[in-house]
Image (cartoon, coloured by chain):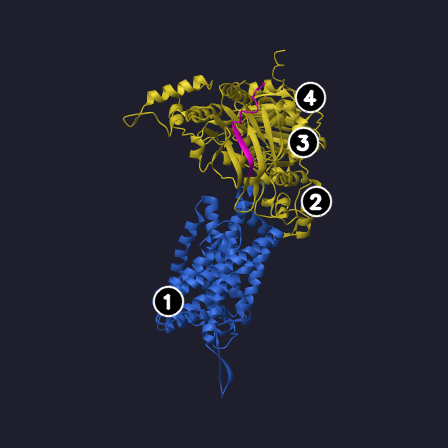
Amino acid sequence: MMKTISDTIPPRLELRAVSKRYANGTLASDDVSLSVRRGDIHALVGENGAGKSTVMKMLYGLEQPSAGTILLDGAPLALRAPADAIAAGIGLVPQHLQLVPSFTVAQNVVLGGEPARFGILDRRAAIEKVGELSRRFGLEVDPSAPVAGLSLGERQRVEILKTLYRGAGIILLDEPTAVLTPSEAQALFAALRSLTGQGVTVLLITHKLSEVLEVSDRFTVLRAGRVTGQADAAAVTAAQLTEMIVGRPLAPLQVARSIARGRAALVSARGIGVAGPDGAARLQDICFDIAAGEILGIAAVEGNGQGLLADVLAGLRPSDRGGATVDGQAVTGVGVRAARAAGVGAIPEDRLHNGVAADMSIADNAIAGAYHRRPLSRFGWLNPAAAQAMASRLIERFGVAARGPYQIIGSLSGGNMQKVVMGREIDGAPRFMIASQPTRGVDLGAAQALRRSLVELRDGGAAVLLISSDLDEVLELSDRIAVLVQGRIVGHFNGGADAAAIGARMTGGHQPGTSATLDAPFTGEAAA
Amino acid sequence: MMAQTQEASSHARRLKAAVGAALLAGLLITALVSQEPLRAYLILLTGALPEIGWSAEQGWQLHRMVRFGTVIEDAVTLTFLGLAVALPFRARQFSLGADGQMFLAALAAAATSLFWLRTGAPAWMLLPAAACAAIMTGFAWGLLPGLLKLRCGANEMVTSLMLNLIAVQFYRLAVADWMADPSAGYQVTPLLPEPAVFSTLLEHTNVTTLLFAVPLAVAAAALLLKRTTLGYEIRVTGSAPAFALQAGLPVGRAMVLSIAAGGAFAALAGLHISNGLLKRLPVDLNPGLGYDGLLVALLARNEPRAIPWAALFYAYLRTGAQAMERGTDVSRETVLVIQALIILFVVADRLLPARWTGSRT
């Protein structure tokens, strides 16, 4: 999209040499300058901890800059509180949506600025106003529907409507696609396009390269609080952008696919079913095989039963029906320790919750899977030298940036922590690895190292189940892909399948009888 | 390692600041209620120390050894009780059962001591037997809250408190009805026989050879936590329960055994009371010492090696407070307020503004 804005018109929003130093001394923003043109989608990119959120908080009045100025249409702006930002026409769509579920869409949108007649909420006016807004900006949603029944994509539209209702001319979106299906994300970007067509300016905070390259007009890269790049999105390649974000070139990971058709299954799951507390099925008739040296990817949007599936397979909770075997040995319903003894390794999806003990040392965390066996323990006594050796080995082998085996693991970055978690599991030489969201919240460099480790594990003959809500990751690593929707497998694809086809299946309805066994047909092939 | 030492030194700074602030607050309150606040306050702070006096006839002499003995005696009891609370806390089990475990263990030790010689068993084995009986009783009683939690999902705080009531009432029943000495003027067991009593170390005090068990108990608790697989399971369970489950640790066993192991340490406190301090058990032995053990564990942040020092600090403060109550115009209630304030400050040192301690967080 070409813009013809002469230099005499000031940018819609500008940061001039803005720095933010927190009370504890952390310099979160260091001399950040960026300018956003009217009607642009401007991406603010960077890894976790690069300072994106700090910039956003300063723009929304949640934090105040220690130095520098924020300008709106060329005039300096003091943002002491979110109310100032709203008054200046800046709206925020937070990452975790904040709507009242029991209210209707219209009630949520007008909340805080209700149209009133004689002091009483004018419901009809509210519905009319919201309906009009929604039509004008192409954000389709039924104003009288209760929010509780909406999908996450629809809720996000409600949040955007809310900022527009309050008169926002600039909308800040914080990682808006984290919770969306691919098609919902496409719909969101189409809606953003129609907004910018009507003069609204969008600042999109993201860490996904594709959102920068395909959706944005311009972008600004932050690294360690400083601006490391600023350009038109059309003018750079993915490799150049990666280098700006990471600070060094990152050779792409070349994964050769392994074809397991006709081979024997190492891991085989049949008919796994789990009912929720209300009796409704949360997992239903899950069937899949994984051969030795194969990665089966599970493509699923958050909350479709993939966490539960990982727990069942790791032995953390029993299934109500069906089960899984590794090399003929049952691993479900026998408890974690027995499952591990049978060769199961698991990387949990939320590492701070159950991947590590955050206030204990790297050594204490490294030995968690093997502490009860020699050489780590003898007759109930721990061997500290062996624990230290093991931690040092993991640090060395997986390139963990740490001061030593006794550093508290919670003080490591997410990527380094995850390297310890994955290293611990790989060190146990698992034959079946369950990797849930293995690179979530991890910076690009570390993510690549972690993915490479998984592929090496596969090449060493292990069966890997990769569960990720990052479809790109599933596509990059998987030899076969199963699509999970509402606790059922609804699609089975070859590793090289088309992202659009998989994405369509992720939002589509139930396909009865789909399984991901080694001889099951791929979706779309069945008819042929 | 660096992070740990940094944290430790910042913790030490905070502790100093907290104690200083607490002492100041105590002085202010004393000034409000006393005619001679400085002297009264000095007694609170130094009353627990022995007095060095000199006289022509006897040369240098230590006075007030009874009072100083009380400090040591209390510190010994409180160390055991502090360990008893700290072990379950490390597994994030809020067991408040130290009192009951201690009462039953004292009873077991006294009963063994009274009946051992009648069976004709050798006298030299009496003390080890009494200690064994006490420890096994404390451990067994300590198993109950954990098992109830594991099998029935009962909250360990509630069950351990209720078990305390049962234990204390059973103790009273046993002392009054089954073990009472008819020749004593009040309800009390007969004096324990000579071989059942720990020998005295300091004259005029009840500081006994059980003092030597303190470093052993502390080392045992520290080793248990740091160097055994059970201790590892306890620490991981306490630090991150979900992670412990995910890693396949026997979380239930760690919970149960942490409370039971605490019971074994509470039993040492019971043994100290029956076979060291009192040498017989009165029916009106005051419950509540277990909660002082809780305070000691809190002061020491559940770190076994810090517990004897916390216990000594607490015992010192308590004895000083008694001296202040007796020797000045400050009332008992005020003394308790000051004492509570000091503990409050020390326990709440995290609440101090950062600039007091020069620390950023």
The residue labelled by disc 4 is A261
Q: Do residues under tags 1 and 3 come within 8 Å of each other at their CB atoms?
A: no
Q: Which quadrant of the figure has residue B322?
A: bottom left
Residue A179: image x %, image y %? 52, 28
Viewer-nearest of discs 4 and 2: 2
Residue bearing the label numbered 1: B31
**Is A135 inside the magenta-drawn segment?**
no
Image coordinates of residue A324 in percent, x first then y, are: 60, 30
- Tell me whether marks 1 and 3 sit on the same chain: no
Q: Are marks 4 and 3 on the same chain?
A: yes
- On the image, the x and y values in percent for residue B157 come to 43, 50
Mark 3: few/some/many CA within 10 Å (<14, 14-19, 20+): some
What's the residue type where badge 4 is placed?
Answer: Arg
Question: Of the numbered discs in the image, which one, if any, rests on residue A243?
Answer: 3
Mark 4 or mark 1, whichever is nearer to me:
1
Residue at image coords 44%, 17%: A136
Q: Looking at the image, which is closer to me, A19 or B153?
A: A19
**Looking at the image, is B353 positioned above or below residue A257?**
below
Q: Chain of mark 3?
A: A
Label 4 residue SS: loop
SS for dot 1? helix
Are callouts 1 and 2 both on one chain?
Answer: no
Amino acid at dot 1: Ala
Q: Earlier in the sequence, mark 4 or mark 3?
A: 3
- Which chain is disc 4 placed on? A
Q: Report the Cα–Cα distance between label 4 and label 3.
A: 38 Å
Comes first in the chain, label 4 or label 2: 4
Chain for colour blue: B
Q: Which residues are magenta?
A: A1-18
Q: CA distance from mark 1 to mark 3?
A: 68 Å
